[in-house]
Amino acid sequence: MKALVRFFVNLMQKYMPDAFLFAVTLTLVAFLAAWGLTDKSFIQVITAWGDGLWNILAFAMQMILIVVTGHTMATTKPVKRLLSTLAALPKNNAGAGMLCAFVAGIASFINWGFGLIVAALLARELARKVKRVDYAFVVAAGYGGFIVWHGGLSGSIPLAVATKGHLMEKLVGIVPTTSTIFSLPNLLITGLMVLSIPLLLKLIAPSGGEIREVDPSLLIDAKDPEEPKQKTPAQRLEYSRIITLLLGSMGVIYLARYFYINGALNLSLNIVIFVFMWLGLIMHGTPIAYVRAVSEAIKGAAGISVQFPLYGGIQGIMVGTGLGAMITNWFVSISSDLSFPFFTFIASGFLNFFVPSGGGHYVVMGPVNFPAALELGASVPKVAMAISYGDQWTNMVQPFWALPLLGIAKLGAKDIMGYTTVVMLWAGVIMGIGLLIPW
């Protein structure tokens, strides 16, 4: 097992490019594939690419807010105290990796942005408190825990199909989260990954001379300015807990009404963002503390904001030229009602390299896979989760969503992807078998 890990670690160190160059390479691959495999001309493919660059701006803003609100929540004093307490528990490198993966898995189930930030902050705290810890391994363990996110409360596809007016509503109606996120099969599959991945990491953890100790300069945090003793009128407003209480109360009243009318499990992407925004505001205590946390959190979203247009362009190629539908249709053609969710999972995992966005997956695969599911007699909620699983599966070797975590950890994708490749292989077995069993 460790020999396999060393192989992947060395492979990624040598050949994994920067995340931006990875996106550029995928753009060129998608362009050439569409030009060569479809009936579209050079200009038509260019047009599809250009038209797609800005077609996901609304979704991009939602994703940025997920990262920012998750980050601000994770950097509140109660959460940081909890992370410090947890970091004191493990005694060695393997234990640190196991803990980071388990905590990140739980946090990612709650909110994917929250999970990424918690993983990064906990990894930094573990590097400070555990003797002879391999920092890259522990950060990789945290990203490994992220693999469960799309089966969790912020999963964009199950939330999308549960939202009125979604893309395929006329065909499949509203698919409630009780049939997707909160279904027993999804909870079992997700729970098994949360529990087993830490055990896998114990087996592959570097030990002895393999441990690469952390550079202390990577663990230096910026300090918040002290609250002034003599405040101007403006500063009294900035440090006013009353303002936070008033605004926070408005948010709580709105959410209470929303859940009373729609049910406690009726979640949408916007409601998840709203919940974490207001929890972060209340837990930070003062408006200025929240503003500073948001300013720091925005840095983690920088890579996403730069790369989203590129992936929007790739999505434009996939949708506009029919290349995505061509790939999906091939998987549909070899499927039965039982195997269809499994092959949907494989197709989604492959497409994730080119469209690393749950919303993008839904746009590319929904119009093909949902009608096929109805025709084959396959379960629509199961197919929705199969697309979700494929998206989260190959994230382990697709650096796009690692950007917020890597930004905080101050590492590169090549430092962690060797370990997460092994996590991907193991989790793929769990999800694949889970999708072959009737739901």
Image: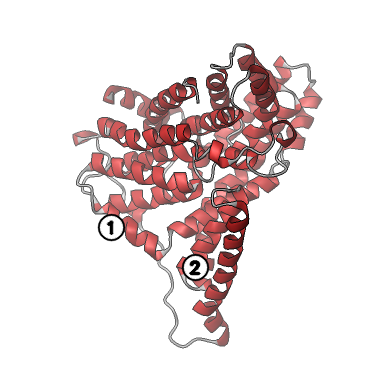
Query: How crowded is the residue under tag 1: few (<14 C-alpha within 10 Å), some, or many (20+)?
Result: few
Amino acid type at image mark 1: Thr
Which residue lies at the image location 39% right of the left edge and 37% below the top edge? 191
> Which numbered marker is on residue 282?
2
Quarter of the view holding residue 224: bottom left
- The answer to whether residue 261 is left or right of residue 194 is right
Q: N-terminal of the two: label 2 or label 1?
A: 1
* Residue at the extreme top: 334
Residues at discs 2 and 1 in contact (Cβ within 8 Å): no
Which residue lies at the image location 52% right of the left edge and 20% below the top edge? 342
Can the viewer see residue 138?
yes
Which residue lies at the image location 58% right of the left edge and 60% below the top edge? 255
> Which numbered marker is on residue 85?
1
- 51 above or below 321? below
- 142 above or below 335? below
Percent x, y of residue 254: 61, 63
Element class at badge 1? helix
Amino acid type at image mark 2: Ile
Q: CA distance from mark 2 to mark 1?
A: 22 Å
Residue toward you, 360 or 279: 279
Position of the N terminus, as image quadrant, is top left
